Amino acid sequence: MQTRIQELRKQRKITQNELADALDVTRQTIISLESGKYKASLVLAHKIAQYFELSIEDIFIFEEEENLC
Amino acid sequence: MLGMFCGTSVTSNEEYRKYVKKRIKVLSLLIVLGVLTMGVVFMAETIWNMELESYTLGLYSGFASGLIAAGIVLILKNRKLLKEEEKLRQARIAASDERNQQISTQASKIAIAILLIAMYLIMLIGGFWYPILTKMMAFLVALYVFAYCVAYKVVSKKV
């Protein structure tokens, strides 16, 4: 799963620390999310979507096998 | 690094403060356990008239003082946390961070697998020299399987 978190964060000139603080997670979690090493839970994905005022699908790019069809 | 069994799902500093206070109470059990260990050694020597080897005595005293020291240090660390709001917030975030919790769960799974393999090897090889080891290790493996099954049933009812 890929994410657009880094792209959106840079667009809005937000640091990883600021995003981590806003989401109540560690900076390392943001780093792992951005690099695609860690998959966010539904709650965290929802928080991230709310933070960027977008939908989950706009931020998280699911691989083919992760989709229903 | 997140401590073992330290994950929580609290969302505010106030909730985390209560959690830390509870943790301090649990940590005081370490001191109780240390004192109890010292008491058992003392009673073994004085009341039960057992002549413990100096190695065994040193080992038990080491366990006891280690438990007491660990308890005191951890209690002081947690008390200090309660006094500093920013450090409390950072500790809360580290403890409730879902990635940290996932790492902790995976690390526990690996550690348990290694422990089970080690116990099986001790049961298999150590039993040649000390047959009691075979019984002890077999009992511990059986206890683990039993505890897992019970815990699985209990947790599955909650989730």
Image: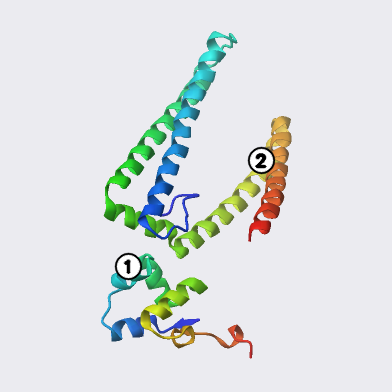
Q: Residue furthest bottom?
A: A69
For marks 2 and 1, give the CA distance. 48 Å
Is A23 on the left or on the right of A43, as rendered?
left
Q: Is residue B86 above or below residue B134?
A: below
Q: Position of residue A56 (x, y in %)?
A: 47, 83
Colouring scheme applied when the structure was drawn? rainbow
Residue annotated with mark 1: A21
Helix or strand or loop: what does disc 1 sit on? helix
Name the disc covering residue B128, or none: none
Q: Position of residue A44 (x, y in %)?
A: 46, 72
Q: Position of residue B109 (x, y in %)?
A: 58, 56
Q: Residue furthest front?
A: B14
Between circles 2 and 1, the one closer to the viewer is: 1
**Residue occupying image coordinates x 42% and y 56%:** B95
Q: Residue A27 versus residue B59: which sits nearer the camera?
A: A27
Q: Amino acid at mark 1?
A: Asp
Quadrant where the C terminus of chain A is found in the figure: bottom right
Q: Is residue A54 above or below residue B140?
A: below
**Residue occupying image coordinates x 56% and y 51%:** B111
* Number of disc labels: 2
On the same chain: label 2 and label 1?
A: no
Crowding at mark 2 (Cα within 10 Å: few <14, some 14-19, many 20+): some
Residue annotated with mark 2: B122
Give residue B110's quadrant in the image: bottom right
**Residue occupying image coordinates x 38% and y 56%:** B92
Helix or strand or loop: what does disc 2 sit on? helix
Label 2 marks which chain's residue? B
Label 1 marks which chain's residue? A
Q: Residue A57 versus residue B37: which sits nearer the camera?
A: A57
